[in-house]
């Protein structure tokens, strides 16, 4: 029966970044609880990547599951145009309490990529409302990643994973990737590329979008917090909005509730997602200030011109409310600090391996940058032998574990990463 289901999967189901000509091997997941994913053959895998960075509280937390069940019994969905509901209102209130003062106008979206698209549209519509009709482009960083929809791809690294689609993507401006590491000594020269870009093209730019502190899906890179301070000042001088994409970093992943707190910088628009619902249901948001919202809505359209069918889905919002309450119920910051210390201690020795180019850690994120990525067959073998689910990409073997991951599980994760990097570590 299991093999028959896998055959049908290969025949009809297209997986992320996968070929239908030669489908990659997949494991049949039948349940997930806490830090573990259980397979049909009975094996359990430690989820070292929080199922693409979202299951920060672990899988199926009872409080989130109960909230979803209760809401499903009352109302699964209602269009958000002309209606509102308690889960959306409660979640908005919870977000406003957690966010820096001033970010309090919340537009719910279906996914992180769509939240980025909404943020970009907000920025352009804001500038049009101000009479700045030439400001129809954005600026972004090389090495950045903002999602897989067309608008989000256009804002991601032009030489990254989306180069195939250059011909269909809107044109934007890109600055060189920040090179000074988080925690190293700052040098103003690292901001020079962005400074020149804004100076030369500022009249065409509606906003700058960056992933604050941590560049995720294209670079796995931690850069200096002073870059954000310089960027905020430069945007203010040019009348350009600043967008922070915290889809990956929001809600504690870097050790702060939001990565922007490392630099003490307030953006004009913030995008959040992933951990927002504790990894249970897709939901995201583009959040802005009263000034941006009021200015945008004073324009010719008189409203923000976006409206997803499943915007503020009640089940997703109920899950988000439960996730926010859950986050306040335990010492997540202490948990992230414990994970960070363990990752630094246990990954640093791998720097001496000839296969390893760099080692970097911040919060509950650990990265081994390799000179060459091991084959899919090797990855699958290490996963099965160690019982640790890792999903390397490009040249990065990384972990972003749930905050509830135990110290013993972290040790198993780092040993599995070492094996993938070519070390001789065994369990």
Image (cartoon, rainbow, N blue to C red):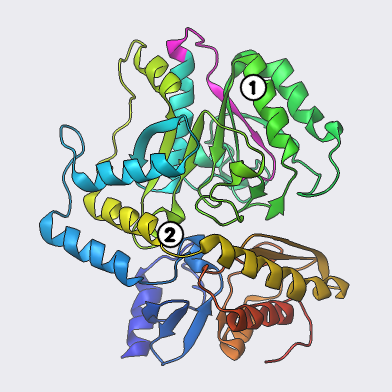
Front residue of this view, candidates 111 and 323: 323
Mark 1: few/some/many CA within 10 Å (<14, 14-19, 20+):
many
- Circle 2 Cα neighbour tier, 10 Å, few/some/many (<14 / 14–19 / ≥20): some
Q: Going 86% across and 36% down the picture, which residue do you hit?
A: 187
Work out whether 324 lies above or below 173: below
Residue 136, magenta (yes or no): yes
Q: CA distance from mark 1 to mark 2?
A: 33 Å
Q: Quadrant of the N terminus?
A: bottom left
Quadrant of the image containing the C terminus: bottom right
SS for callout 2:
helix
Instruction: Identify the disc placed on residue 327.
Output: 2
Q: Residue at x 65, y 44 (%)?
A: 262
Tell me the residue that label 1 is attached to: 235
Q: Does the rendering let one see residue 43?
A: yes
In primary-sequence order, the first of circles 1 and 2 is: 1
Question: Is there any visible trace of residue 310 in the rendered image?
Answer: no
Residue closest to the far left:
74
Picture coordinates of residue 371 (x, y %)? Answer: 80, 66
Q: Secondary structure at mark 1?
A: helix
Q: Quadrant of residue 412?
A: bottom right
Of tags 1 and 2, the one toward the viewer is: 2
In the depicted structure, whether residue 342 falls above or below residue 81: below
- Where residue 175 appears, as percent x and y from the top left, is 72, 33
Q: Determine the image quadrant of residue 163.
A: top right
Q: Residue at x 84, y 39 (%)?
A: 186
Q: Residue at horizontal 54%, vertical 41%?
A: 245
**Looking at the image, which is closer to me, 96 or 208?**
96
Q: Is 145 displayed left or right of 297 in the figure? A: right
The stretch drawn in magenta includes residue 40: no
Residue 382 pos. (x, y %) = 63, 84
Q: Position of residue 146 (x, y in %)?
A: 54, 44
Residues drawn in magenta:
128-144
């Amino acid at each position: 029966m299991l093999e028959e289901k896998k055959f049908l999967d290969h025949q009809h189901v297209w997986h992320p970044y996968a070929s239908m000509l030669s489908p990659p091997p997949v494991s049949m997941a039948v349940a997930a609880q806490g830090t573990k994913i259980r397979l049909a053959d009975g094996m359990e895998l430690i989820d070292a990547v929080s199922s693409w960075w979202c299951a920060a509280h672990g899988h199926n937390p009872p409080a989130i599951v109960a909230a979803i069940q209760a809401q499903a019994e009352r109302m699964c969905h209602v269009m958000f145009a002309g209606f509102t509901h308690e889960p959306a209102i409660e979640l908005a209130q919870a977000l406003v309490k957690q966010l820096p003062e001033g970010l309090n106008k919340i537009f719910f979206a279906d996914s992180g990529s769509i939240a980025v698209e909404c943020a970009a549209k907000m920025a352009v519509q804001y500038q049009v409302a101000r009479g700045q009709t030439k400001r129809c482009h954005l600026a972004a960083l090389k090495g950045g990643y903002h999602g897989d929809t067309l608008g989000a791809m256009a804002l991601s690294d032009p030489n990254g994973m989306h180069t195939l689609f250059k011909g269909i993507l809107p044109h934007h401006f890109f600055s060189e990737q920040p090179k000074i590491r988080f925690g190293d000594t700052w040098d103003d020269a690292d901001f020079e590329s962005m400074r020149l870009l804004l100076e030369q093209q500022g009249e065409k730019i509606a906003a700058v979008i960056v992933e604050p502190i941590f560049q995720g899906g294209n670079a796995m890179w931690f850069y200096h917090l002073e870059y954000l301070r310089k960027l905020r000042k430069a945007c203010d001088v040019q009348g350009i909005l600043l967008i922070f994409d915290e889809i990956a970093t929001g809600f504690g992943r870097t050790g702060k509730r939001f990565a922007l707190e490392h630099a003490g910088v307030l953006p004009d628009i913030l995008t959040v997602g992933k951990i927002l619902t504790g990894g249970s249901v897709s939901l995201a948001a583009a959040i802005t200030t009263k000034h941006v919202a009021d200015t945008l809505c004073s324009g010719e359209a008189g409203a923000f011109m976006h409206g997803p069918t499943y915007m503020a889905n009640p089940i997703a919002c109920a899950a988000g409310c439960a996730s926010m309450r859950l986050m306040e119920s335990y010492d997540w910051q202490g948990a992230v600090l414990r994970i960070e210390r363990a990752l630094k201690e246990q990954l640093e020795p791998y720097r001496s391996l000839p296969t390893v180019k760099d080692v970097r850690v911040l919060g509950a994120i650990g990265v081994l940058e390799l000179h060459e990525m091991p084959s899919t067959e090797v990855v699958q073998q290490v996963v099965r032998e160690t019982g640790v689910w890792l999903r390397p990409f490009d040249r990065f073997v990384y972990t972003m574990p749930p905050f509830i991951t135990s110290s013993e599980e972290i040790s198993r994760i780092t040993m599995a990463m070492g094996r993938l990097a070519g070390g001789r570590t065994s369990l």
